[in-house]
Image (cartoon, helix red, strand yellow):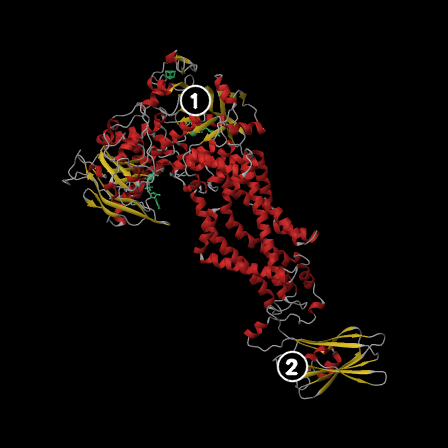
Amino acid sequence: MMAAAPLLEIEDLGLSYATEQGTLRAVDGVDLRLHRNEALAVLGESGCGKSSLAKTLLRTLPRNAYPPTGQLRLDGRDVLGLPEERFRREVRWVRIALVMQAAMNALNPVVRVGEQVAEPLRIHHRASRRQARQRAAEAFEEVGIPTDFLRRYPHELSGGMRQRAVLAMALVTEPDLVLLDEPTSALDVLTQASIMNVLKRIKHERGVSFVFITHDVATASELADRVALMYAGQVVEAASARAFFSEPAHPYSRLLMASVPRLYQEQPPSSIPGRPPSLLDPPAGCRFAERCPWAFERCSEPPPMIPCGERRQARCWLHHSPGGAR
Amino acid sequence: MTPWLQGLARLRQYPSALAGLGIIALLVAMAVYAVTAIPYSEARELWRGGEAWQDLPTNASPVWTDRLLGGNAPRTIRVATDDVVMEQERYEGVRLQRAVLPVDFPYGGFPQEINLFVESQFDERQPFVRLTWRTPDGESIPLDARRVGESERISISQDRQLESRLGFTPQVGLFTDAEPGADDPQVRQGTYELVIEAIQFEETATLDANLVVYGQVHGLFGTDHKRRDLTVALLWGTPVALAFGLLAAVGTTLTTLIIAATGVWFGGWVDAVIQRLTEINIILPLLPILVMVGTLYSTSIWLMLGVVVVLGIFSAGIKMYRSMLLPIREAPYIEAARAYGAGNARIILRYLVPRILPVLIPTFVTLIPTYVFLEASLAVLGLGDPVLPTWGKILNDAQAQSALYHGFYYWVLAPAALLMLTGLGFAMLGFALDRIFNPRLRNV
Amino acid sequence: MTTPQPSASASRAARGEPVLCVEGLQTHFDLRQWGFVRVGSVRAVDGVDFTLDAGETVAVVGESGCGKSSLARTLLALHRPTDGAIRFDGTPLNGLSGSALKAYRGRVGYVQQDPYGALPPFMDIQRILAEPLIIHGVRGRAERARRIDAALEEVGLTPAADTRGKFPHQLSGGQQQRVVIARALLLRPAMIIADEPVSMLDASVRVEILELLRRVQREHHLALLYITHDLSTVRHYVDRAMVMYGGRIVEQAPVAELLARPGHPYTEALLSALGDPDADNAHRQREVPGGEPPSLIQPPSGCRFHPRCRHAMPGKCELEPPPPDFRPRPDHRIACWLHE
Ligand SMILES: Nc1ncnc2c1ncn2[C@@H]1O[C@H](COP(=O)(O)OP(=O)(O)OP(=O)(O)O)[C@@H](O)[C@H]1O
Ligand SMILES: Nc1ncnc2c1ncn2[C@@H]1O[C@H](COP(=O)(O)OP(=O)(O)OP(=O)(O)O)[C@@H](O)[C@H]1O
Ligand code: SF4
Ligand SMILES: [Mg+2]
Ligand SMILES: [Mg+2]
């Protein structure tokens, strides 16, 4: 699994929006590393900057966003500095595809889904109309939609089918990395489970890497090899899924895991009191300090990502060894 | 309501909106001034014309047009016997009264007309009046000599005998020293005098005379064919136009909106009936109907307003509001309101209608001038209110008197400019409001 | 909210009578072509029986489109039932109208799925909460303000003064849902119907809202019907669960029993489709019944689940609909031939 160079390296990535109230820092100093055929779940509650992170990766930022800062490397090659035209030709939808949040509701209602799914191929001049249609049919099969649905209009498809169609659209150009922004949040559990099944199969069969954005811990566990937990614009813990789900390191991770309603556990879930800070004016120290039961004096300083295991870091002073060896 | 205030506060970012607001404020100020300075009944009375205007020239251009052209057109000069000393001499049984009315005439053109208004009081015998014109050179020209009644207008400029004696029309001949019959008589500037000599046969009889030498220009806006100062109609046209526009816009938009909401809410046959009525009404031509009502019934502005509102209710707006309201009908908050017991009327008025009011405000603002124009068009077609002075009525008079043919541009330009200003002001405000309120609606 | 109302339902409950009693309920929607020709109907609720006791929380679980919301709306008298009987507090709901209907609506609270959509965007919170009070004739500004503040504080929006003057878009999703719950509580209802109250919310606030619902339900001894598609949110917050499929209830049992011994193959499928967070989840395919949810216009014959059922018995399941009350235990009812 550990290939030589990571597929995607994110270093100190930052993104701000200009708003009427001032500058809103939605992504702040994010470091992440993703290897080939790995699935990274980006977890975090609403407004913590997950979608902004995904949009930065694919440069689909809204107008009021400032240019992102930091480093972004795909196969060791810088992509943040790439001119827009080359980015469009060489990266977007060619190497990285995105399934946007609520994309299933954003399908064009007057164009047949088959044509919409083939659209990325046509845009990138990678196929004739006929080939594109052929590829779209294959993508449909891959995600489990009967191919005769190609000729239907979006409103003729159920929610689950529409979500599969947007998934097919992301896969049709055979990218190395697919970003999924809350792909199952609006669906019921059965549909959700079958879509997760599709994703698992594709990952296994095609060796695609995924960045899977969700606010639901249980859903994250359905695909993730690694987990990055975000809080108020920062990654607060990055760990392997196994480590994260069995013994979360960051206090926020622990409380989050305890707040998950579970089917087979006697102990009722407990909610996390308080609300995340405003991103317009985040606290100077640890951003979670106000809600953290373990907080101590040191927490008024901003904690760095502190290594606390193999390929594992937590942004918390509790993991800081006084010797400062690491 | 905070969002409303926020929206209005954002108007400050639009210079065009501020300009529009400025224009509207100006119009409102004019309207307020008009109704306070000239009460409604007085305005109606004035506009009927007649004696109130006898001192004014007909079809006089505004003073500033003359200034602009660098001319020196004559103004109106009024001199009364009250302003001068009246000499008296007594003979057996009669009194001789004598007054000299000075006319200071520094202008480059001839007056339009010369009238002397004479009033006298006597029991039985009318006074006898003799008029003499004295030029600055001291030359005396005898004018009329006659008995005068209690109130009399002596039209010096209409005196045909005098005209033939002078070789010019009197208003020219009396103010020039050119040879009679010359082609291009020039004004002789200086102080002229009208000598009035009256013989009174009764001890208590009196005589007052009032000389008016009519100029070619008058005031800020000029006068019309009935000597009426256009200022009155231009001023009073403002409140009439604003009130008509506002009432018609409010009347049509609100009722239309409520009817559309009712149809949307009840659906079924109620909606179907409203839809069909609208479709029929859309193909009914508004203007011809108004013309019909105006010719057959009455052209009162209030009746016209009523007809406009009634015909405007089932207008195409219903279709637009309906398409906006249909998705709102399905909104969860409406369902919630039903679930806590809100009745139909409450849902329509408090849950459906307020939701689309923000979009309506810009439409509403831009609708106001449309109705102002409609009222003006009606007046131009001769269906203006019979008694009220309005902008449209000025245009109608101008048209009837072939103002443009005669070169009385001012007569058309002033009301047209006010109409355009109104349209511009409301349009600029409306477009800015549209930009402020509409993206909101698209977001939610 | 200071004094719990000594209501008729409390006394009935003492006698062991249910607050809500639903028998053979059907809600069908006509499908029309060109607006008038009836071409069929959507059998959204198609023969539902259950009871709800005072102080009891019951979950209705089922996948999208199985008729959960239609059931809720019928119970709220927002749809007219096609057939069947609903009795609330012993009074039949059929044919209620005018002030009796309004009074009924005052006694049933409603919490919707989308909190933002459920609050009129052009009213501030004070106004939103005043509406039900005004409609139900609570006179006096001061009295209304007092009840509004009490309700806001009860749902944890303290101090109430911070929230009162705000507009819905100025609140977070969780806070909006709290306002919706406050509105449902304002008229001191005997029953609350919550239609997917947390499915649009962020996972981190779901638990808060569920805890809040549970708390107010206990404090006011309310009957609570909690509709969800997610069984994982059921375990700690309800007493009993009903599983709905294709417009019918296929299984009902106390929640622990249902999770431990699911009787209906569909319940099993729902349970196997989700799991607790675990790193191994990523490496195994979940068992999901194939096929699409059943059409409610032409529902499958016999057992409506048979086309997707692993255990379907040919010659039986597709022919005869199973009766809704095979009882492996007195309080466990299953509509499946396996339990005959
Ligand atoms: N175009 C924008 N302009 C200004 N602020 C924005 C913009 N888009 C997002 N934000 C703000 O940036 C922050 C992060 O937003 P983002 O959409 O990335 O969050 P998220 O984690 O994806 O949340 P969700 O789960 O609700 O989708 C939020 O506080 C949001 O309000
Ligand atoms: N007013 C209506 N008119 C016609 N059909 C309707 C109406 N309301 C619901 N339906 C149909 O009835 C069926 C059941 O819908 P319902 O909303 O009750 O399902 P649900 O279980 O609440 O689903 P979800 O989980 O998606 O909310 C659906 O097929 C829906 O299309
Ligand atoms: S009745 Fe038959 S088809 Fe229906 S659930 Fe039971 S076994 Fe499956
Ligand atoms: Mg997002
Ligand atoms: Mg529903």
Q: Is residue B309 above or below residue B405?
A: above
What mark, if any, has residue C314 been given in the picture? none
Q: Is residue B171 above or below residue A102?
A: below
Residue B39 lies left or right of residue B321; in this view the side is right
Name the quadrant of the C terminus of chain B: top left
Q: Is residue C270 above or below residue A112?
A: above
Q: Is mark 1 within 8 Å of ligand 2?
A: no
Question: Which type of secondary structure does the marked residue at label 2 adopt?
Answer: strand
What mark, if any, has residue C56 been given in the picture? 1
Q: Is mark 2 within 8 Å of ligand 1?
A: no
Residues C48 and B111: in front is: C48
Residue A58 lies in quadrant: top left
Quarter for ligand 1? top left
Subunit bearing disc 2:
B
Residues C218 and B249: in front is: C218
Q: What x and y, as percent, mark residue C240?
A: 40, 20
Q: What x and y, as percent, mark residue A164?
A: 33, 32
Which residue is disc 2 drawn over? B104
User: Total number of numbered labels?
Assistant: 2
Q: CA distance from mark 2 to mark 1?
A: 106 Å
Amino acid under label 2? Asp
